[in-house]
Structures are given as C-alpha cells and as structure tokens.
Amino acid sequence: EHRAETKTARAGRNSSPDPPEVAVALPRRRGHPRGSGVLITCVTVHRQRARRKRASAAGADFFVLVQTELGDVFKITVDTAEGASPAAARRVTGLTASLLDTLPVAAGLAVTRLGLLFVAAESGDHGLYMFDRIVLTGAPTCTSAEVWAARREHGAKAYKKRGGEAALAEIRRTFYTPERCASIACEFVPTRLQSLLLVDSVENLSVATGVLVGELAGGEVSPQIYTLCGTGPRSSLRILRHGLAVTELAVSSLPGIPGSIYTIASPDTGHDRYIVVSFADATLVLSIGDTVEEVNDSGFLTDVPTLACAALADGGMVQIHPGGVRHIKDHQAKEWQCPGLKRIERAAANSMQVIIALAGGEINYFELDVVSGILNEMGQKVMGLEVECLDVGPVPPGRARSLFCAAGCRDDTVRILSLSPGQALVQRSSHLLPARPYSVALAPLPSEPGRDSQALSIGLENGSAVRSALDPVTGAMGAPSARFLGARPVCTARAAVGGSPCTVLLSSRPWICRSDGAGKTATVPLSYTPLDHACAFRSEAIPEGIVATAGETLRIVTVELASEGAFNQTCVPLRYTPRGVSHFGENIVLVESEANDLGTLVKESFGFDGSGKQDKKAKDNEGEMDIDSDDDEAEKDEEEDEDDDDDEEKAAAMTTPVRGPVPSKPGTWASCIRLLSPSSTETLDCLELSGNEAAMCCSSVQFASRGAEVLLAVGTVTGMTHHPLSHKAAHVHLYRHAGGKLVLLHKTPVEGVVAALAHFQGKLLVGVGNALRLYEMGKKQLLLKCEFRGIPTMVKTMQTAGDRAYVGDIRHGMHFLRYDPSLNRLILLANDAISRCVTCQELLDFDTLATADKFGNISILRLPSGAELGNTSNAGPTRTLWDVSALNRSTSKLEMLCHYHVGEIVTGMTRASLVAGGAEALIYTTVAGRIGALLPFASRDDVDFYREVEARLRAEAPRPTGRDPQAFRSYYVPVKQVFDGDFCDGFAAMPHAVQEKIAEALDRSVAEVLKKLEDTRNGLL
C-alpha cells in the first residue's frame, strides 16, 4: 500500500493504479452538519437469485443493504474483476452506494427468498416491505472512484509536505473525516418510499417508557392500558384493551328490545337465509341476501314470540312458540299444540331433534323422521320442578342425533339427559351449581375422529360461567371450572371462530370460550359494547360471523384472532418520545421531548416534512423490476381505473416516518405538552415548547388555596446535555384547562432538574435535583414552604399517600419520608439498604412499595415496624442543620419482602385489575415492549402449590440454553417469594408421562393441576 501511494503521488493524476483500499462515501442528507458523521447501524447481504449460477463480468452476484442511524437505507453494489490467475479469487475494484429508501431504524434487516425485506424495528411496529424496483436509476449515488480521486489529490499534497511512512499516516488520519465525506458525497432530501412498498406490519410496543391503567374511555367495563411507546417520529400512545378485536360489519335499529335471536341455514349452501328476532309478543323474520330485509312469507308465526327455531334435515324449518311446535316445509305448516292450558317456557332444537319444557317442569322430546318428514314424540319426563334453561347440542357429522341434552333447573342444578333410542330423557349426571342457572350451551370440542366430545357451558344469574367437559359415552360431567364474567346474568350461545367451534358468553361484556384441541381452554373477552343476545351467522361474504342484539339494535360482527389471548390496541401517533403521562380531569396529559432534535416549528421553517407523505418523484421505467410488456400495459390500465380507496392504500404503503435534521450543537431539544381525550383519542391541545426547553414530567395538582380546581404541573429543563450532565435552566410550569385548551398561569425557576412531581396535602411536592421541595400556589410563581436535602443523588420517582412521601433516588434506592405540619418539615423514616438505580415505583399499601431498577429487578419493600417512631428524635428545630450528616447513621432500613429478576429494564409500573371480579395485580412494562404482571397470592396453599410445581418443573423441563431458570431469576439478588408463572404454565406442554409424575408428587391429578393453573391465569385475565 505504501508503494502504491508513493507511485500515485509521483505520477499525479495521469496514473491509474488499483487503489490500495476501496471506499465509498454514502449520500448525505441535505442540511446535515458537515462536522457530524453518520453511523452505520445495520447491514444485510442478499445474493441475487438470477446470478447464483453465474457471476457477472461487471459485478458480484450479490448486493449489500446498509442502514444508518437516521434510518436511510443504501444499496451497496460491489464491482469485481478476475484475479491474476484462473485459480486466484476475484478482487474488488469498486463500490457504488445508492439510496434505496428511508425506513425505521432497525435492529436487523433480512431479505427473504421471495424478495421481501423484513425490518425488525428498534422502536415501533416491525415492517415487511416489497421491492418496487431494484435497479436504482436516478437515485442519489456515490462511487468509490470519487473517493479514490479525492484521496489521490489529498495524497499528492501530503507527500509534498512529508514523505514515506509519515505521509501515509497523515493521509489515513486526515482523509476519512466527516468534513471530507461531506465534500465528496452527493446530497438528497428524504421523502416517502420510492423503491419499497409496505406489505404488512407486526405490532411492537418497544420502546415502552411508561404505563397508565384505568377505565378512561367511558362506557367500557374493563380498564384500558395506556402505554407510552416508541422514540422520535415513531413515538405513539398505544391504548390496549384486553380481549379480541371485533370488526363491526352492520348495525340496524329494531322496533323494540328483543328477547332472543336465531338464524336459519339454507339446506343447499349451508349459509344462513333467515335471521329470526323474537320480541315479547311478536317475531321478526329477516331475509339474508344482498340486503337484509323483512319477509312475511317464511311460514313463521309473527304474532307470537319464538322460543327456539332451527333448519331441519328434511329441508324444512321448525318454530317453537309458547303455544306449540310448528313444522314448516314446502310452504306448508304442521303444528303440535300444547295439551290443555299448559304453555311452553323453554325450548331447544337442532337439525334432527326438538326439546321443549312446559310449565311445571315437564320435558317433551321430538325427533325428526327423515323418511316421512314428521316430528315424532319420542319421550316425556316430569322433572318435578321448573326448568330454567334447556339446550341440545348440534348433531355430530355422520350421526343421526345428538346423544345428550342439558337442562338447568330451579334447584340450582344442571342435569344431563340421554337422547339415545330406548333411553330417552334418562338422567345420566347432574351437578350442583353455586347459583341458579340462566342459560346452557352444548358445544363440540376439537377431538380425535370418532370421538364426539362436547363441552357444557352454563351461565349463572350471579354473572359467573361454569364450564365442564362431557363424557361422549356416559354423559358424565368432568371437573367444572367457574369464572366470574360480569354483573349481569350470563347468556350462552354457540358460534365458530378461527375454524373451530366456540361458545359466546354474554354478561357485562361479551366473551369467547374456545379450546385449542390440546386440552387448554381460553376464555377471553371481546373489545366491544355489551350484547344482550347472540347467535352464529354464516354467509358467502362472512363465513364466521356473529349476529347479536344490543338494546334496540341488530349487529353483525366478526372476531379477529390476530391478538388472541392478549390485547388489541389503538395507536395514537405522537411527535416526540413520550416522557410522562398523568390524569387531568376527564382527560390525560402527555409530555413529549426529544434530545438532539429540532422542534416542529423550526422544521417547518426549513421546509421539512417528517410525516413521510411527500409525493414521490417520477421513477424511470428502467429502474423497475423486469416484468413482461403485456403485464406492464395491463398494470397501467388497472392503475388508471383505480378508485380513491386504492390510492389511499398505496399512499399509506408508501408512507414512512422521517427523522428531522440533526442540530449542529448539543443541548438542542424538541418538546411539547399534549392534552388528549381518552374517549375519542383526539388531541384537544398541543403546546410546543421553544428555546430548547424540554418537558420531563407532569402531574395534576389541587391546591388548597384554589379550592377544587385541578391544575397541571409540568417540570421542564432547558439546554440539558447528558455527557456531561448539565443544563442552563429549569422551571415548573403551571397550567389550567379552559375551553379545551391549556392556559399557562406562571413559570417558577428552580436550580436543579425536575424529574418528579406529585400532589401532596393541598400543595405541590417537587423533586429538584437532590432536593425535595413543597410549594404553595402563588400569584406570579410557586411559593416555597418546605425543603428536604437528604436525597443522595437525584429524585427520579415520587408518590404520596396521607402524610408520607415515597421517593426514589436515581442511584441510591427508595426513601420513605413523613411530613410534620407542626414543624413544617419532611422527616426521613427509612431508606433502602441497597443502592438501586430506580426507574419506577408503585405504592401497594401505606407501608409497602414495589420498585424496579435499571438492571431488570423488581423488589417489594416494606417499612419496618417502629420506624415511624424511631426518627422522632431528629424532629426538633435545633437539629435541622445536622440532619443531613446524620441520616445514614440513624435511619432505619427498608425490609425487602420479594425480589424477582425480569431480565429487561422495567420502565413503568402500576396497580390495577384488568377484568371484573379479577384480582388486583402489579402491571409493569419493559423497555423492550413487554407487558407483565405480578399476581399476589391469597392463601398459603397457593404458595405451597406453586413452590412444588416450580421445583418439579426445574428438574423435568428441558433447558434449551442449558441454564437453570432459578439462576436466571436470581441474576443479581437471589429470587425471593416470587414464582415464575410463565415457567409453571409450561406444565401444560409437557408430555403426559411427565405431567402424571409431577401431579403424583403433588398428590393431585393432572386435571386438577391444569385447573389450578387456569384459575390463577383467569384471576388476572
């Protein structure tokens, strides 16, 4: 290399030897600081399929995709030449870097065999992109020849001043600099996607910076989880609702409040042709076609309520009403009338069987004779008490009848009756229920061919649901499992979701209960309005739907299984990285700030649009992928005929968030304060902060001097840099809500960084650097009333309750303080024995607190008994000057009750119950977008059970990494009084022999262990 450099320097520009090294400058964004470099953060190599068997004479058979820290993706093409001999390897002669597109900053890139690009985003949703063109004609491009020419010129100047090795070292030190690259590289302006199209995306909560849980939307039963996610232009507020997402397809009004709803299937296609809606004194029959409309020629009686109806196997229909059973076929009706003055109160039917319950507890059973087309009465049974609900399961494929029916009786029992020939209505089993049954449903279970397994779901009047497996031969009921669903009586119905049968449970909110075929049953709610009645719905356009009623409306919906078992989410885009969230009346407030970024107003003055929605430039046809000419013409014709919806979809597929221009000096911030309505997810107001002022935290506060008015306090810092940690100014802003806007009352300057705020006894408690200050409301600024300077490093988190303040230090753990109003002082009660780098905290009770540190540990700390009285000796006013030096010597230490290593940095923590009647749990979020929960045990038996299960599984479960699970959970501190629920859930996936071995050691059956695990899981979700 030295000889090549010397030869180049002597020959000047007329010589053209091969360069000693091949380098290419990447195109740079217009306006990027010349003295600032750009890091390459992600690289992937793709070998082109068309060139795998032969190498190109002009270049290699592969290309490289590199991404910078700004998100710009470049295609690097390698030019090669033959070696000196046939056996010698090919050598690289040049590089070409062309701008492909601007994508989200990725943790990894991968090009699939189908030619799709997967982007595993560092923050925000992952994306799958399709190449719209691979030959980047007209794209900003730089070549290695440009770099080599500039280096030869630079080397000639260096050899004039110095010679030999000194000149070579000088070239290497001074040539590859950001300024030099900026002078060589071409410039570009990032726009929307030009070479790629977004095909699909995977939801991702990373990076999660905070969490808030509560029923803030209004009209929903369960609370929502408001998660602060993402960084930069991919920041968002994700509103997570527990349950499956529901797509509403149609809503229409009804003439009254219905009592039930049914569907009648067509015998030819299997699709539903009628929707039957029953009212208190009438029946409405709707025909299903291109539109849903009322018909009067169906053969149904419309002046009586319908108790049950079904399509029969002979092509007819059956309607059961209080006066009798009506069999309709070929526009002719045959009717069975109730004897005497008796009336039908409950009924159920399938394609072959009809069961009715008369007043007084008499059950009659009818079965269809397919040959004669007559419903024959097969049996009668007097129960001796009123029947509250009745159901017969669907006829299994290849069978002539369903073998069992279920009857719920007024004595709080459910009874299984046989429907086998010669044993009609013989009781096979019964079960005592904790409350009166309201509805029953027999639904088939996924099972082996030849086994017609069924599950019995019972809805109770107290809002609970009981589920039990039914033996297909004897009709015996298995061990039942109960779950509380809501405050309303539970209505049950059969449906199909995801290609498998399920049971719809309707209470204060709708639920879906389905089995995965491996013995694991999942009962998950639907994120939808409460429904009164439901039934399965099938049509050509909707193969698996649900038709339901809610009040005086008829609704057709479908259930999406993409988020099964977890949450469905609504995304609200934000401007900058969210730093904090707080309640503010009926709304919520978010503070957003971005380091090393310019504000929106400054970007707009530069003409920058970070939405990524700019119109793309016309592309050269030569740069597009090779397609037959006929296809090109057909595609052009189709594009001309595209409607507005297609244009919007394509525009959305070409949209990409773009990071703004990089500031030229450190300490530049962009920040805003957003007032958002949780019910409509609309931004009511967004205040942009200027002058490099960044909002770091917020809290609602009610000053005693201002009555009941709720104000908003925001802590800000100006010109803050991290290395070294410094700032120019810091303030506490105070806002009020007026006319849907935030109105600034005043700003109070403080000396340190404000990282935590809290309402405290009619005043505002502020963490200012390593000091804790108590402020009162003033006319022009806040008035300082009390100060505590015993925090070692800096206040990071803070909560208050009663006369106590719970403060987390950024390096030295938790501190419990008490406010003495007689002395107007904050007194330290106890501090942490371990120096924890606190990231978040949550108060569990007056003496107990949960905290997390930046190493992924969660701990439960408690104030030791007698600690509140132990520090009263330091409360005198004469010792004020000496308290700080004596803190560590005289202060009690907090007791650590529990400890658990999560493995990821916990960024948010709160205490909430996710379902009605569920246990209150500790909900946390991690920086990687994980949402977890710690569920407290209510009895010692539960503790012993999980201790034994975890110990047995550690010995039997496979270890893919070879690491002991307990050793991982004890990474920094030995795990204490916390059991790994995810690890214990692995019991269901173990081989049956291992399950029996573990269950035998626990002195339980396998079914009892599975039921115990399921009950614990249902207690949370």
Image (cartoon, rainbow, N blue to C red):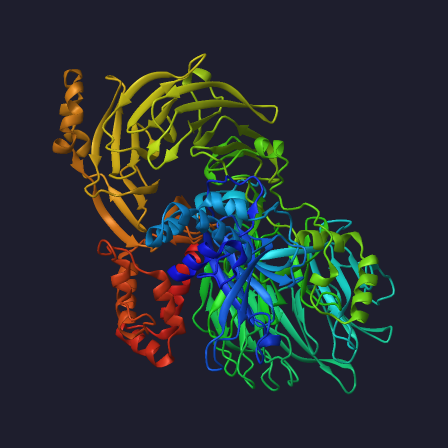
Position of 1000 with respect to 20 (left or right) is left
**Residue 327, picture quadrant:** bottom right
Query: Which residue occupies the foreground of this view, 196 or 526?
Result: 196
Residue lying at the far front in this picture: please name it. Answer: 10
Q: Count all numbered tags in the image, as a single digit.
A: 0
- Which residue: 84% across, 67% down? 299
Position of 826 with respect to 536 (left or right) is left
Query: Which residue occupies the foreground of this view, 721 or 189?
Result: 189
Position of 656 with respect to 486 (left or right) is right
| 443 lies above or below 227 | below
Image spot of residue 289 (x, y percent): 82, 64
Residue lying at the far top in this picture: please name it. Answer: 779
Visible residue check, residue 287: yes
Query: Which residue occupies the foreground of this view, 210 or 601?
Result: 601
| 92 lies above or below 226 | below
Image spot of residue 210 (x, y percent): 43, 43
| 363 lies above or below 892 | below
Query: Which residue occupies the foreground of this view, 867 or 968?
Result: 968
Visible residue check, residue 462: no
Image spot of residue 486 (x, y percent): 52, 51
Which quadrant, please, contains the N terminus?
bottom left
| 641 lies above or below 480 | above
Image spot of residue 431 (x, y percent): 47, 69
